[in-house]
Image (tube, rainbow, N blue to C red):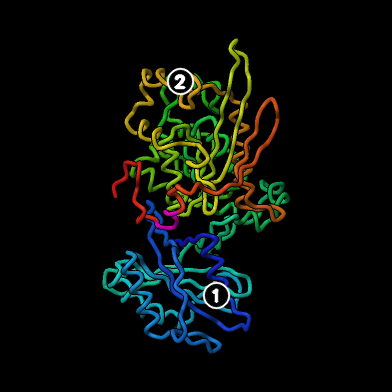
Amino acid sequence: MKEFSLAMTGAIDEQLRAHLVRDDGQEDLCFALTYPSRGERRQTTLIAEVILPRDGERRVHGNASFLPQYFERALGLALSNDAGLAFLHAHPGTGWQGMSRDDAEAERGMAAGVFAATGQPLAGLTLSAKDGFWSARVWERDGDGAFVRQDCVSVRVVGSKLMVAWHPRLRPAPRRTESLRRTIDAWGAPAQADLARLRIGVIGAGSVGIPVAEALARSGVERVVAIDFDIVKEHNLDRLLHASAEHALARTPKVDLLKAALPTAATAEHFDLDARPISVCDEAGYRAALDCDVLFSCVDRPWPRSVLNHIAYAHCIPVVDGGISVSRLPDGRLRSADWRAHVAAHDRRCLECLGQFDRGWVQADREGRLDDPRYIEALPTDHPLRASENVFIFSLAAAASELMQFLLLVLAPAGIADVGAISASLPALRVERDTRSCEPWCLSPTLEARGDRAGHPGTRVPD
C-alpha cells in the first residue's frame, strides 16, 4: 500500500511560520513550489520554495481567502520551474488537523487545475497556530478521474533538529511497555514516541552497521531497513557481531545476521525489519532508502557515500555518517586510531566537504578499480583508499559516535542540537568539532528539496 508524506527544510519551515502565524490571531495562507521524491513504498512531497502573497492577492478576515490572480501566478511559477504546487494555511488549533467541508472542497477544486498543469497532485498543509504542528495531505486522481484526499503519515522538518508531525491514526504513538521502562525514563514518553515511529535505514551491515541496527532495535525503534549486498568472509570474523566461521563458510549475506538477531533484540511491540541483500547504488536499494526518515551511512566505499550524500540534500533525509582511521608505527605497533561522526543534512557540511569522499574516488569505485589489487597497490601507502586496518573495539566507538549524533538530531536534549562533525582520537583522547558550512563550490546545497528532479548523478539509477 502506498504511503504519503511531506518534508521541508528548517529554513522553509521558519519562513512559513513567520507568515502564517499572525500577531493579530487571524488565519493566513500561501502557496509553495513542490518536488516529488518517489521511494519504493512512499511518495514524499518536498516543499522547495514559498510563494508569498502580494498586496491585493488575498483577503484576511478572521479566516483567509485568496483571489484568482494569486493562484494563477503560483501556477505559472510551478510551470516555469517544472514543479508542483502546495496550498498552505493556518488554523487556531493544536495537533494534527482534520479538514472542514469548506476547506476540503476548496483544495479539491484546485486539485484538477494543478494536476492538469503540472502532472503532480496538489499538496495541502495546515499549521496549528497554537503549537506549530503540521498536518498534510495530497489530492490523488483515482481511476474515475476524481481527486481523492490521501492523508500523509508524517510531515518532516529537517533543520538543526529533525521534527516530525505524525498522523495520530495512520502512525499512532506506541504504548509504554515494561521492556522500555528505563529508556523512556531517560528521555520521556514524547521523545520515545517520536524516535520509535521513525523508519530508519542502516546502509551497510558491517562492523559499524550491525551494532547501530541492534542499538536501534533495543531502543524501541519499530521499523529498520538494512541494505547491504555483501557476504560474510573469514577476514570479517574479528569485527562482525553475530558472525561465525559457519557463516563465512556458507557465504551468508550480512543482512541475514540482522534477520536472525534483531527480532529477538527488539523491544518494540511491533517490530519490522526489512533486510535487503542489495546495494544502495542500484534502483531497488536507492528507492528503499528514500522510504526512510533517517539513514545511517555505515559504508566504507566512496560510491555509496556519494549516493547517500545526494539523498541527504535532494530528498531531505538526514544521513548520519562516520568513519574509522587506524595508523601504525613502522614496527607494526598501533600509532593512533581516529573515528568521526557527523550528520549530512540541511544547513550542515556535506560528506564531500568533510572529506568523506571525492569525485575521483567515486569514479574509480564505479569502474570497479577499487576491487583491483593492482590499482590499490599502486596508490601511495598513506592513501585513504588503502586503509583496511580495523578493530572491533574501534568499530563500536564509531557506532556509538554515530548513535550520539542521531540522538542529538532526533531528541535535541536540553535544547542542544547540531554540534557539527565530531572527531575523536586515541591515544590522545581528544575530541574536535567541525561546524563549518559547505565550501563555496559545493553543489549539495543547490540540490536541496529537488527530489527526483535533482537526477541521480553517480548511481546506476535511471533518470
The main secondary structure of the magenta stretch is: loop
Amino acid beneath label 1: His
Q: Gap between marks 1 and 2, in whole Å?
A: 55 Å
Residue 309 coordinates in the image, percent (x, y): 45, 45
Q: Secondary structure at mark 1?
A: helix
Q: Label 1: few (<14), some or many (≥20) within 10 Å?
A: some
The mark found on residue 380 in the picture is 2
Stretch of the chain drawn in magenta? 446-450
Residue 92: percent from left, percent from top:
59, 79
**Residues at badges 1 and 2 in contact (C-beta under 8 Å)?**
no
Residue 19's disc is: 1
Q: Residue at x 45, y 87 (%)?
A: 56
Q: Confirm whether the magenta stretch covers residue 76.
A: no
Identify which residue, 89 or 15, lies in the foreground.
15
Task: Kindly give the residue lying farthest to the top in the view shown.
Answer: 331
Q: Name the residue: 42% across, 21% down.
A: 379
In-front residue for pair 125/434: 434
Question: Where does the image place residue 280, in percent across and percent down from the top left?
Answer: 40, 41
**The residue under label 2 is which amino acid type?**
Pro
Is 432 left or right of 108, judged from the image as shown?
right
